[in-house]
């Protein structure tokens, strides 16, 4: 088995683990696959198409791209690619680019507003297409970076869950690449030679906090190999009684519990 085959098998194994561990896909699901034109979403589509073929259950996939009307966006790339794959798809045209640029103060990052606008549009599209689930291309590195962004800059222990429901409660959002490393995805993307479409909104911002956190995590991994895997394990091994959140653990009743134990003994 050559290196490319090993890489492909590794990604398939990681996606299979996420699907199984979080019960992501069930018989009869119709999943909207959000395709941005980046390496992550292309890889996610490839992985889901593979499991659609080999899984003992039936589920449907529809690829959806949101054309945000960024200057120079190559409109023909994704339709051509998806037509060649013979994958059902829909292109949504919505000028969120203008809204983001008009509303974002000079010197501020566009990611937060862009993400909210994009998310709302995609949720509505999923409902219109009759999809009960929506798949996003975030990977292990994204999950770790988001954890530290929230930890350092927002003051909360929170990250991107592999599976959750939207606020309305009528759509399940999946992250099938949750256990896949960005390095493996990049290697697979280069091998598959995807027609990558760069993001002119995010890619033009060099001083994003996320980029700084990404660099920090990368440096840790070089200095202490396997650090990323350990941190991912930590996110799956939480002890509420050893944190400080009174909403997760009832610290106030500890004395009462101790008194009850003393009386019984």
Image (cartoon, rainbow, N blue to C red):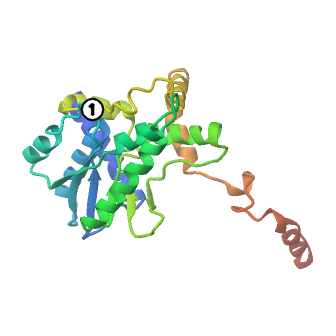
Q: Considering depth in this image, is 228 or 36 the residue closer to the camera? A: 36
| Image x and y of residue 131, in percent | 28, 65
Residue 1 in view in this figure: no
Identify the secondary structure beneath mark 1.
loop
Res 149 seen here: yes
Front residue of 20 and 113: 113
Above or below 222: residue 138: below
Q: Is residue 159 left or right of residue 121?
A: right
- Say which quadrant the N terminus sits in: top left
x, y percent for residue 249? 72, 62
Say which quadrant the C terminus sits in. bottom right
Residue at image x 58%, y 45%? 234
Asked if 225 appears above or below 78 in the picture, the reply is above
Residue located 54% across and 38% down the image: 230
Q: Return the residue at label 1.
A: 71
Crowding at dot 1, Cα within 10 Å, few <14 / some 14-19 / many 20+, comes out as few
Query: Residue, x 88% and y 67% (percent of image)?
Result: 255
């Amino acid at each position: 088995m050559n290196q490319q085959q090993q890489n492909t098998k590794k990604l398939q194994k990681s996606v299979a683990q996420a699907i199984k561990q979080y019960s992501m896909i069930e018989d009869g699901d119709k999943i909207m696959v959000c395709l941005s034109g980046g390496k992550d979403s292309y890889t996610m589509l490839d992985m889901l198409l593979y499991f659609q073929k080999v899984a003992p259950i039936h589920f449907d996939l529809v690829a959806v791209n949101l054309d945000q009307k960024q200057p120079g966006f190559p409109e023909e790339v994704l339709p051509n690619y998806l037509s060649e794959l013979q994958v059902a798809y829909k292109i949504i045209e919505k000028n969120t680019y203008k809204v983001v640029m008009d509303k974002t103060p000079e010197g501020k990052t566009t990611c937060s507003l862009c993400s909210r606008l994009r998310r709302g549009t995609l949720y509505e599209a999923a409902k219109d297409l009759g999809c009960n689930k929506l798949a996003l291309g975030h990977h292990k590195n994204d999950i770790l970076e988001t954890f530290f962004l929230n930890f350092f800059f927002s003051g909360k222990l929170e990250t991107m869950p592999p599976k959750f429901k939207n606020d309305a409660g009528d759509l399940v959002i999946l992250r099938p690449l949750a256990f896949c490393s960005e390095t493996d995805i990049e290697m697979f993307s280069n091998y598959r030679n995807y027609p990558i479409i760069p993001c002119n909104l995010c890619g033009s911002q060099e001083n994003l906090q996320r980029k700084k956190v990404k660099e920090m995590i990368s440096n840790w991994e070089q200095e202490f190999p396997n650090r990323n895997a350990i941190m991912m394990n930590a996110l799956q091994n939480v002890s509420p009684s050893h944190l400080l959140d009174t909403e997760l653990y009832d610290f106030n009743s500890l004395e009462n519990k101790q008194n009850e134990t003393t009386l019984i003994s």
